[in-house]
Image (spheres, rainbow, N blue to C red):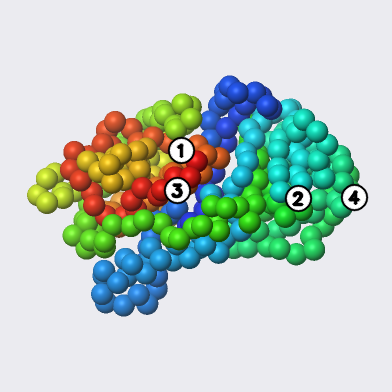
Amino acid sequence: MEVTQRMRSLPVVRFLSVRCGAAVVVALSAAFGPAAAQPPAGAGADPAAAIVAAQKKIDDEYRRALMSPFTAVAVQYFEPGRSCRLGVGASAVAFDPAETMTEMVDMTLDAGAFWVSPVAGSTPPVILGKNAEGDVVVSPGTPVKTRTKIGSRDVLGMGRYFVEVFPGPDSGNARVFDPDAASRRTFAGLKWFPPSVALQVKAVFEPVAHPDKIVVATSRGLRKEYFRVGVFRFAVDGTPLTLTALAVAAAPKAGDELFVPFRDATTGVETYEVGRYLTLPFQPAGSGYVLDFNAATNPLCNYSPYYNCPIPPRENRLAVPIRAGEMTYPKVH
């Protein structure tokens, strides 16, 4: 998923590719929503309380994070070998700005890595690190004075802004975060259905003997490739249902993430118009699964225009309402 796990509330990001400054995107990036709201350890015997506690944990992580969909303020997509100029000011940020800004750097995607070169500014940008959850660690950092490679665990600090890069051999993107963004200041928590123990359903996983590749459309009109690795069979209120499980590899290993995007009868009414996501770890053959729809979360594009989200395939459209998990977040974009 966009897919290294960061904080379960933070983006899991893949790559898009466009010409710098161009309007046409020529390859894809995926941005998933928060990871499943798993009950925290020691949540107690009350399953409804455990659901609420897990959802509150996601809210708290979003509220605390310096880099999240609620602090994202800009994004740029790159083809290999392409460069873009990034400028920041006291209260503005822009890729390829028309005028000189307070601090400016050139960013280049080269050989599957991002490189940064200072262009303007009395204070050089700095290389910062990430914590275990994937959020930035604020520190004095390492000044960038010459052309410097940005590693996968690095964050570029420019003034009050943070820049995270997602390089790949064929495409990449850079996203800018402002901890003082208005959407963070006004964040009052995600919108959740009341907890539903009945929608923690047991499911039988039927693996696909020969996983085939599936092309999934995205909210930006792009496409993303996954492998169809299995089908979950379960029932809601006596209605038999199925959901296809996707993975980034044809042969997932135990613990690898299964991606289950879905739509249901609440989609576009009570829940987000694109659909919602479940993620869960792949288990060895013969293991039991529980699909906890209380853990269904929205794609990050519900919260911010700076993300691109896979649209659930037609086979994952449920005719019944699933009134559990996340509801539509009031969009401000």
Q: Residue at x 75, y 64 (%)?
A: 139
Q: Residue at x 39, y 73 (%)?
A: 41
Where does residue 318 sit, x and y in percent of width and height?
Answer: 22, 39
206 on left or right of 24: left
Q: Which residue is mark 4?
A: 122
Give the SS element for disc 4.
Answer: loop
Dot 2 or dot 1: first in sequence order is 2
Mark 1 vs 3: CB contact within 8 A: yes
Quadrant in the picture for residue 45:
bottom left
Gap between marks 1 and 4 measured at Cα? 38 Å
Q: Nearer the viewer, mark 2 or mark 1?
A: 2
Quadrant in the picture for residue 49:
bottom left
313 on left or right of 183: left
Where does residue 225 sit, x and y in percent of width and height?
Answer: 45, 31
Q: Nearer the viewer, mark 4 or mark 2?
A: 2
Quick check: can you spot residue 244?
Answer: no
Identified by mark 2, the residue type is Ala
Q: Which mark is residue 171?
A: none
Mark 3 vs 2: CB contact within 8 A: no
Q: Which residue is mark 1?
A: 309
Residue 199's place in the image compared with 172, above or below, is below
Identified by mark 3, the residue type is Gly
Dot 1 or dot 4: first in sequence order is 4
Q: Which residue is mark 3?
A: 33
Give the SS element for disc 1.
Answer: loop
Residue 296's place in the image compared with 243, above or below, is below
